[in-house]
Image (cartoon, rainbow, N blue to C red):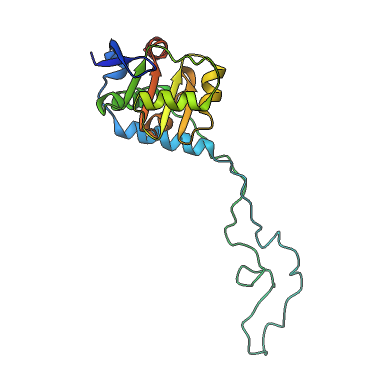
Amino acid sequence: MPKVALYDITGSQVGDLELSDNIFGVEVNTHVMYEAVKNYLANQRQGTQSTKTRAEVRGGGRKPWRQKGTGRARHGSIRSPLWKGGGVTFAPKPRDYSYKLPKKIKRLALKSALSSKVADQEIIVVDKLELEQPKTKEMIKVLSNLKAGKKTLIVIPERDENVILAARNIPGVKTTYVNTINVYDILNCDSFLITKDAVNKVEEVYA
C-alpha cells in the first residue's frame, strides 16, 4: 500500500496517508494511457474545418478553350484543382472526430495515470485547501509553500469558489473536481495537488 506525506497549506508535514493499492498502486499501463489521451484530444476537436471542392467553387461552367489546336494543354474548367482559384482535390469537410472508449480501458488508464504520479513522487496531498478570500497571491503562496511545479493540477472534492477564482489567473495551474479528472490533465502536470477529502472520494468513486 503506497504511503505519501500529508501537508497543510503552510507546507508543513502533518502526517502520512496510506493510499489504496487498487487505484494508486497499480502496474502502470502506458498503452491504455496513450489511448485515453488520444481519445480525449480527439473529443476536443471542433471538426468545423471546411474547404470547397471543384463542384462548389464559383464559376468554371464554360470550357476555357477548345480541346485541340491551340497548342495548350486540354482543360474543361477553370475551377479544376490544377488551376489557381480552383477547388481543393480532397477538401476537408465538417465532421465529428469524437469516439468512445470502453469503460474498463478508461478506468485502467486513470488508475495508471494516478499510480504513475505516485511512483514519480509528483503527488502532493494536503489535509485541507481553504482560502479566506479568492486572492491569486494567496494561492501562489500556498503553491510555493508546497513546492508545486510550474504546471499544477489542483483536485478538489467539490466546487470551492475561493480556490477556483484564486487559481484561475495563474499560468499553468488548473483546477478540477474528482468526477471530472482525466488522464490527459494528470499526465500533463508537473505536480498533482489533491486534498485528503478528494483522495477519499477518488478511492470511493473509482474503486
Location of residue 45 in the rendering, given as x and y in whole percent from the top left corner: 54, 40
Location of residue 113 in the rendering, given as x and y in whole percent from the top left corner: 34, 27
Q: Could you say which is closer to the camera, residue 198 or residue 41?
A: 198
**Is 68 situated left or right of 104 in this image?**
right
Q: Could you say which is closer to the camera, residue 134 or residue 90?
A: 134
In the rendered view, would you say 118 is above or below 42?
above
**Is 47 situated left or right of 68 in this image?**
left
In the rendered view, would you say 129 is above or below 122?
above
Q: Quadrant of the N terminus?
A: top left
Location of residue 82 in the rendering, given as x and y in whole percent from the top left corner: 60, 71
Q: Is residue 102 visible?
A: no
**Is 201 situated left or right of 54 in this image?**
left
Location of residue 87 in the rendering, given as x and y in whole percent from the top left corner: 65, 63
Total numbered circles: 0
Residue drawn 48% across the image and 36% down it: 171
Q: Is residue 113 visible?
A: yes
**Is 23 situated left or right of 159 in this image?**
left
In the rendered view, would you say 8 is above or below 84?
above
In the rendered view, would you say 132 is above or below 168?
above
Residue drawn 53% across the image and 32% down it: 169
Residue drawn 66% across the image and 67% down it: 86
Q: Could you say which is closer to the camera, residue 59 or residue 151?
A: 151
Q: Quadrant of the C terminus?
A: top left
Q: Quadrant of residue 115?
A: top left
